Image: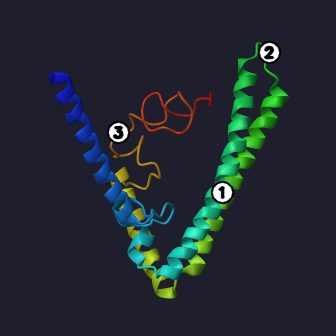
Amino acid sequence: MKTKKMTIGILAALIATSMVFAVNAGNKKGRGQNGDRGMRGFPMLASLELTEAQAQKVDALREKERAEIDKIRAEMDKVHADIRAQWEKETVDKTKLKSLHKKMQSLKAKMGDARLEFRLGVYDILTPEQRKKAAEERKAFHENRQNRRGGNGNPDGYGQGDGPCDGGCGRGRGRGGRGMGRGMGDGPMW
């Protein structure tokens, strides 16, 4: 009897939770967090008060960029798998690895180009007043970012000077990328 009551209680809670999520999802009308348009790459667009026509044009540009980037990512995944396969061999084919590395760099450049085309397209959609406001917000964002990173002119804000680590946690060796803490840094991407 207790099991039956407990099961009914759990089901009721699940139904109530799913209804709350369904109602909230419906309120956003395809928009991102807090009802904005999820302006990745242009976070200040939410404050620029786009017209509906502008918003539709931005959405179309975003879909085009997403499709292009998805295609590039799929190709990058294949190249990355080939690189991993080369490293897993007993004897590494250096020429093949260098070729794959160049291909990966080319794909990363294509991704950057797709992102730039999106941003340029959005810029063309904005009115002169919106462009001015976006430039002001971008400048303020970058100034605040530099302050959060520790300032002192160091682009990373870490690893030297009087930043948060005072020279002690700069680039380490480890799992690929340029990390900011111990164990992260300029290690190989495998």
Instruction: Give the CA distance from mark 1 to mark 3.
Output: 40 Å
Residue 156 locus on image (x, y percent) = 46, 48
Identify the element where label 1 is drawn: helix
Q: Tell me the residue at 76%/23% (across/down).
A: 86
Quick one: label 1 or label 3, which is nearer the N terminus?
1
Residue 106 locus on image (x, y percent) = 75, 48
State which mark lies toward you, 3 or 2. Answer: 2
Residue situated furthest bottom in the rendering: 128
Describe residue 112's horizontal placement relative to residue 180 as left or right. right
The reply to whether the C-beta atoms of the residues labelled 1 and 2 are less than 8 Å apart is: no
Callout 3, which amino acid? Cys
| Residue highlighted by disc 2 | 91
- Near mark 1 (Cα within 10 A), the count class, few <14, some 14-19 or many ≥20, is few
Describe residue 94's horizontal placement relative to residue 20 as left or right. right
- Residue 188 figure quarter: top right
State which mark lies toward you, 1 or 3. Answer: 1
Quick one: label 3 or label 2, which is nearer the N terminus?
2
Q: Tell me the residue at 57%/80% (across/down).
A: 125
| Residue highlighted by disc 3 | 165
Callout 2, which amino acid? Thr
State which mark lies toward you, 1 or 2. Answer: 1
- Near mark 3 (Cα within 10 A), the count class, few <14, some 14-19 or many ≥20, is some
Instruction: Give the CA distance from mark 1 to mark 2.
Output: 37 Å
| Residue highlighted by disc 1 | 67
